Amino acid sequence: MTQVMKNKILRNLYLQKSFGFRYIEPFVLKSSHTQQDHFMTKETLQDCHLCDGSKSAKNKIFGVGDPNSKVIFITTTPSMDQNSLEIFTKMINNVLGLSLDEIYLTSLIKCDLSEKIPNIESYYQTCKGYILNQLIDDKKKLIVTLGDTYNYLLETKNDLSITRGTITKWNNFDLIPIYHPSYLLRNPSLKKETFDDLKKIKLLLEQL
């Protein structure tokens, strides 16, 4: 069984679980590269009501930027405050030589909630099918996780100060965790480490 088929099965299971089902009937996977038979996609996001967050979300954001970019940045929640966005923009401009329009930025949780999310893990488990759908087709990309996103995505509890800048294989992707821009604002002494991580990312992108 290929990884693509495994991911399709996993998305189906998460969707069934979100509706309260503990078991599902056998189903047939169609050999198709179209989006017509897909669920939990950009097209279905606006009608998603799988969690309480969907009732109070200001917006539902699937991703921004260029979906065909070689690099995908993944945050935990969809939006950054203005100061964090400014430092993130400078990071990719000054080191990677890319603009916001030339990278793809997405998130584990798709609902843009104004208040702080009390239980990120439960929201992520509901949204998980979306991120799997986004990362299913093209493996010639580099994933960069920001902050705690790494541990949620890989279901680990690693210390980011140790894992940051290291290359991990995840679903056949090369994945590198770095500090979140908001964390750098609170800890400016870590900017040098992040600068080094971004230089490594630039070298990897040049090899794709």
Image: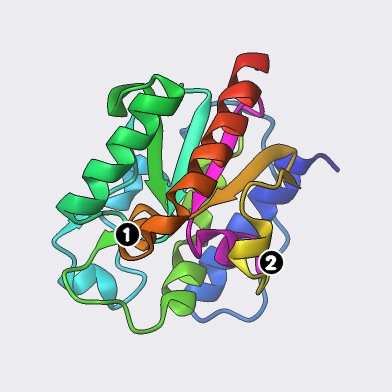
Query: How are the residues colored?
Result: rainbow
Using the image as rendered, state which of residue 29 and residue 90 is in the foreground. Answer: 90
Q: Is residue 154 one of those drawn in magenta? A: yes
Q: Which residues are magenta?
A: 138-155
Q: Quadrant of the C terminus?
A: top right
Which percent across, then down, holds residue 201?
Answer: 58, 31
> Which element carries disc 1, helix, strand or loop?
helix
Q: Residues within 10 Å of mark 2 (few under 14, many from 20)?
A: few
Residue that appears at 30% across and 54% down: 78
Amino acid under label 1? Answer: Ser
Q: Quadrant of residue 31?
A: top right
Residue that appears at 63% across and 81% down: 22
> Which element carries disc 2, helix, strand or loop?
loop
Q: CA distance from mark 2 to mark 1?
A: 44 Å
From this viewpoint, is residue 74 visible? yes
Q: Quadrant of the N terminus?
A: top right
Amino acid under label 2? Answer: Glu
* Residue wearing tag 1: 182
Q: Earlier in the sequence, mark 2 or mark 1?
A: 2
Q: Is residue 34 left or right of residue 95?
A: right
Q: Is residue 79 one of those drawn in magenta? A: no
* Residue wearing tag 2: 25
Which percent across, then down, holds residue 152?
Answer: 56, 66
Which percent across, then down, holds residue 190?
Answer: 46, 55
Q: Is residue 16 left or right of residue 184?
A: right
From this viewpoint, is residue 37 visible? no
